[in-house]
Image: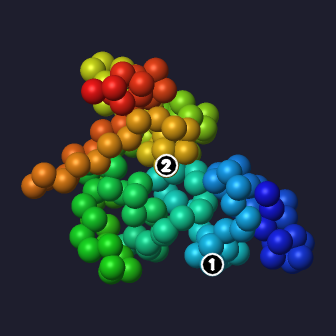
């Protein structure tokens, strides 16, 4: 898979387009117009290495996926319809930015830990979803987000 627009404009081998090729769903033909805009303006998420998806600007002018922010307990997503809807990104512990993602292998952004007991596996929420890990979000008054590494995903699916 390669975006035909990127190929025509001589940008087929840029990091963003290569990332799009790696993260494109099987059988997809082209990225959405939002994904194209993100690729061409060089937007990247401050919480993960995935360069495609729905971005919102943070208060300090950086960009973040709404879904990445939702999975960080320190971050409050005020109103996803507002352009700058995040509060608390600066409160994320710096130690989580040094942990490698067991799905993509990168130390970029901020990882979360497997929700199973004392498991120490860490990963980015979008990488977990793309890798087929079991991720679960429930909203029963207070939203709860749980994600499990590859080793513990099958056990959690069966429950």
Q: Measuring 58% from the left and 51% from the top, which residue is drawn there? A: 49
- Residue 53, relative to residue 125: is it above or below? below
The residue lying toward the viewer, choosing from 74 and 55, is: 55
Instruction: Give the class, few, some or many, for how many residues have Cα within 10 Å of label 1's Cα (few <14, many ≥20).
Output: few
Q: What color scheme is it?
A: rainbow
Q: Measuring 54% from the left and 30% from the top, which residue is drawn there? A: 102
Q: In this rendering, does residue 95 appear at all? A: no
Mark 1 or mark 2, earlier in chain: 1
Label annotation for residue 33? 1
Q: Measuring 28% from the left and 65% from the top, which residue is drawn there? A: 77
Q: Position of residue 126 (x, y in %)?
A: 49, 49
Image quadrant where residue 106 sits: top right
- Residue 122, relative to residue 23: is it above or below? above
Label annotation for residue 126? 2
Q: In this rendering, does residue 128 appear at all? A: yes
Q: Secondary structure at mark 1?
A: helix
The residue lying toward the viewer, choosing from 102 and 110, is: 102
Q: Secondary structure at mark 2?
A: helix
Q: Position of residue 80 (x, y in %)?
A: 32, 73
Instruction: Give the class, few, some or many, for how many residues have Cα within 10 Å of label 2's Cα (few <14, many ≥20).
Output: many
- Residue 82, relative to residue 147: is it above or below? below
Q: Measuring 32% from the left and 43% from the top, which residue is drawn there? A: 136
Q: Position of residue 153 (x, y in %)?
A: 41, 28
């Amino acid at each position: 898979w390669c975006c035909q627009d990127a190929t025509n404009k001589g940008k087929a081998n840029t990091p963003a387009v290569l990332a799009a090729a790696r993260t494109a769903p099987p059988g997809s033909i082209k990225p959405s117009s939002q994904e194209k805009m993100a690729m061409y303006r060089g937007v990247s998420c401050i919480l993960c290495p995935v360069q495609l998806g729905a971005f919102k600007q943070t208060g300090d002018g950086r960009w973040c996926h709404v879904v990445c922010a939702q999975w960080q307990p320190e971050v409050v997503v005020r109103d996803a319809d507002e352009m700058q809807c995040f509060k608390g990104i600066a409160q994320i512990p710096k130690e989580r930015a040094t942990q490698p993602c067991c799905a993509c292998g990168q130390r970029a952004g901020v990882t979360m830990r497997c929700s199973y007991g004392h498991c120490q596996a860490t990963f980015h929420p979008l990488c977990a979803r793309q890798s087929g890990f079991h991720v679960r979000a429930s909203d029963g008054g207070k939203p709860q987000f749980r994600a499990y590494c590859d080793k513990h995903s099958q056990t959690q699916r069966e429950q």
